[in-house]
Image (cartoon, rainbow, N blue to C red):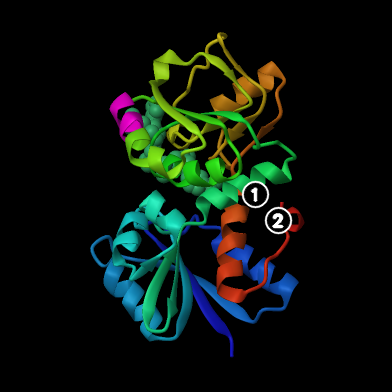
Amino acid sequence: MTKQFAVIGNPIEQSRSPELHHAFAAKTGVDLNYQKILAPLDAFETTVQDFFAHNGAGMNVTVPFKEQAFALCDQLTERAKIAKAVNTLWMQDGKLFGDNTDGQGLVAAIQALGWTLEQSRILILGAGGATRGVIYPLAQAGAKQIVIANRTVARAEQLVEDLKNSVPQTALSAIALEQLTGEFDLIINATSVSLTGDALQLPESLVFHHAYEMAYGKKSSFLDQAHARGVPTSDGFGMLVGQAIEAFSIWNGVKPELKDFL
Ligand code: NAP
């Protein structure tokens, strides 16, 4: 029987998840159908319940519902508990399970680039939902230092407070975005400036050796500045594929190779 999957969000038209999951299915021989569901902003819960009541096998969750999905689950993975957000849902023994695969998707994408995370010093720009989701997986992958820089510094400080006990091997700290300085192996842009068309200014006193932009398919002043410095760069398409592979593997028990889909 064809297994039914979906991605739920609002808006949803832009989602590339159906094409990715159909490509994974073609490669691995899994029989599935994966659709987009536009949920009304005030009806996320009933839309999810309806999907699983009609034999839905699994669901991805995107903006703006990841926190609501977290609140809805009966069982959560450790990384979803830490992220306080869920992007992957499935039913097991009548219970709704939730995971967050975004962070592992980023780690897999960075490793596929051949960039080393073991003992790395990482600067993350932004302290929103995406940053919350990636700190634990980056720490698990061996980061020795993670500095979070945010326009609203109190939000970065709160993130450090919430997460520091979950990543005891990693030095976690917060700074204001206008205080960028120091040397890092990797800088990650997890602000939404590339979506809004705003620019980020990286000062000369900030030294970095690799640059990862979480957004994809958009012009990025962050990547332009990294290119000008001649450091290796990547946009966020690999992270998107990586999180989709993790979800596919949870649901179907078979893991496609990231490099086949980049
Ligand atoms: P979010 O929760 O809305 O957080 C946005 C962050 O951007 C906040 O830290 C905010 O700072 C900062 N920001 C917004 N405008 C700014 C400006 N003009 N100057 C400086 N900082 C600014 O967003 P999110 O969910 O974390 O997503 C962040 C980015 O990651 C987006 O580009 C998203 O597309 C991308 N993403 C990609 C993937 C993938 O699979 N590739 C997955 C998840 C997210 P304040 O706190 O000061 O407002």
From the top left corner, tell me how far across and down residue 12 is, in percent.
Answer: 43, 59
Identify the image quadrant of the N terminus.
bottom right
Q: Quadrant of residue 261?
A: bottom right
Note whether ligand 1 is within 8 Å of mark 1: no
Residue range highlighted in magenta: 152-158
Name the residue that disc number 2 marks: 258
Magenta span: chief secondary structure: helix
Q: From this viewpoint, is residue 237 visible?
A: no
Dot 1 lies on which element? helix
Decide whether residue 155 is among the magenta residues.
yes
Of label 2 and label 1, which has the lower sequence position? 1
From the top left corner, tell me how far across and down residue 106 is, in percent.
Answer: 58, 46
Q: Please name the amino acid that badge 2 sits on.
A: Leu
Question: Residue placed at 67% from the left, 18% from the top?
Answer: 228
How far apart marks 2 and 1 lie (CA) works out to: 8 Å
In the depicted view, which residue is nearer to us: 196 or 72?
72
Image: 166 above or below 31: above
Image: 127 above or below 58: above
Dot 2 lies on which element? helix
| CB-based contact (under 8 Å), mark 2 and mark 1 | yes
Image: 189 above or below 39: above
Q: From this viewpoint, is residue 232 visible?
A: yes
Q: Residue furthest front?
A: 168
Which quadrant contains ligand 1? top left
In the depicted view, which residue is nearer to us: 261 or 109?
109
Q: Quadrant of residue 207?
A: top right
Question: Residue placed at 55% from the left, 25% from the top?
Answer: 221
Name the residue that disc number 1 marks: 108
